[in-house]
Image (cartoon, grey):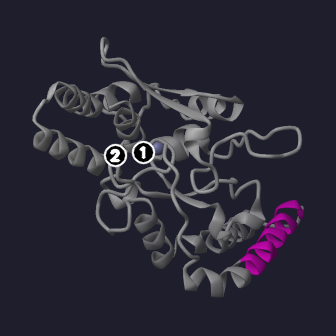
Amino acid sequence: MIHVRRSPCPKKLQKEGPVWLKDLRQAKTDCERIKNDPNSTEKEKAEAERSFKAAQGKYNHSTIKRALQTMFNGGVVSKSTKCAYCETAIESPKGQDIEHFYPKAVYLDKTFDWDNLLIACVSCNEEFKGDDFPVDPEGRPLLINPTSEEPADHLSFLFDVETLESHVEGKDEMGRITVDFFALNGFRSTDKKGRSLAAVRQSVVLGWITMALLFQKEADLDKRKDLLEEFQGLCHPKTQYAAFARAIHRAL
Ligand SMILES: [Zn+2]
């Protein structure tokens, strides 16, 4: 996980957001009234639920999604949008879910709040998060929002040159809860080969560790400079698992 600077709110959301929220609140009130009315038919209940879902889904507008895709791949709209939480590249636009940091099912008023929107992979968004949202006794989030927190303040990105394992560990409560909550080293049902995320990352990080070892042994100053530049490219926010590239870069 790396810090991502939030871009300005898309004009569409800025303009329509307050209206969409008003409609959503009304749709929720109507839906609850119809569901609680013993005289309502199943058809009326289903229709009210459909209207609520339609009002809720307005955030899924193409300009909002595009702004988030751009924000989470370093500034270029391409297939390589990354998950805000696990930094895995999500190739299919269908898998690039608009994620509500504060779950929209619980925090209705944050459904169209630009600061609450992220991009997440299906595992982080649906398999692990869903409507769960750990908070402290004062109601403050215990998960890291990479656009409002500096993840490196809460997480350590570690790699073991002997075992070639790449692990992320929590430095504090927020970090530890985030790592466990999203299984940032663990198994995810979306990996068709049944690998843990640590193992998936390892295959990427291994090449970088090899590069780092070459750099350390290299006596030729020009070649050292080239290797260093290549490494700096890997630290770019667009790179998958950039947090690990930055950790290796710091260790050079
Ligand atoms: Zn993810």
Residue drawn at point x = 56 percent, y = 85 percent: 11
Query: For mark 2, does the 10 Å Cα neighbourhood hold few (<14), some (14 to 19), or many (20 or more) residues?
Result: many
The answer to which quarter of the image holds residue 217 is: top left
Secondary element under disc 2, as helix, strand or loop, is loop
- Residue 240 in view (yes/no): yes
Is 32 in front, or is 220? 220
Residue 29, image x, y percentages: 84, 70
For marks 2 and 1, give the CA distance.
6 Å
**Residue beneath label 1, please?**
87
**Residue beneath label 2, please?**
240
Q: Is residue 90 above or below residue 60?
A: above
Which of the two labelled residues, at mark 2 and mark 1, occupies the earlier sequence position? 1
Residue 234, image x, y percentages: 29, 46
The reply to whether the magenta stretch includes residue 36 is yes
| Screen quadrant of the C terminus | top left
Residue drawn at point x = 42 percent, y = 45 percent: 87
Residue behind label 1 places its C-beta within 8 angstroms of ligand 1: yes
Residue 213, image x, y percentages: 21, 25
Residue drawn at point x = 58 percent, y = 56 percent: 147
- Residue 196 in view (yes/no): no
Give the residues in magenta.
Answer: 21-37
Query: For mark 1, does the 10 Å Cα neighbourhood hold few (<14), some (14 to 19), or many (20 or more) residues?
Result: many
Residue behind label 2 places its C-beta within 8 angstroms of ligand 1: no
Q: Is residue 162 above or below residue 99?
A: above
The answer to whether marks 2 and 1 mark residues whose Cβ atoms lie closer than 8 Å is yes
Magenta region, mostly helix, strand or loop?
helix
Going by the numbered disc 1, the residue's amino acid type is Glu
Going by the numbered disc 2, the residue's amino acid type is Gln
Residue drawn at point x = 39 percent, y = 40 percent: 246
Residue 176, image x, y percentages: 63, 28
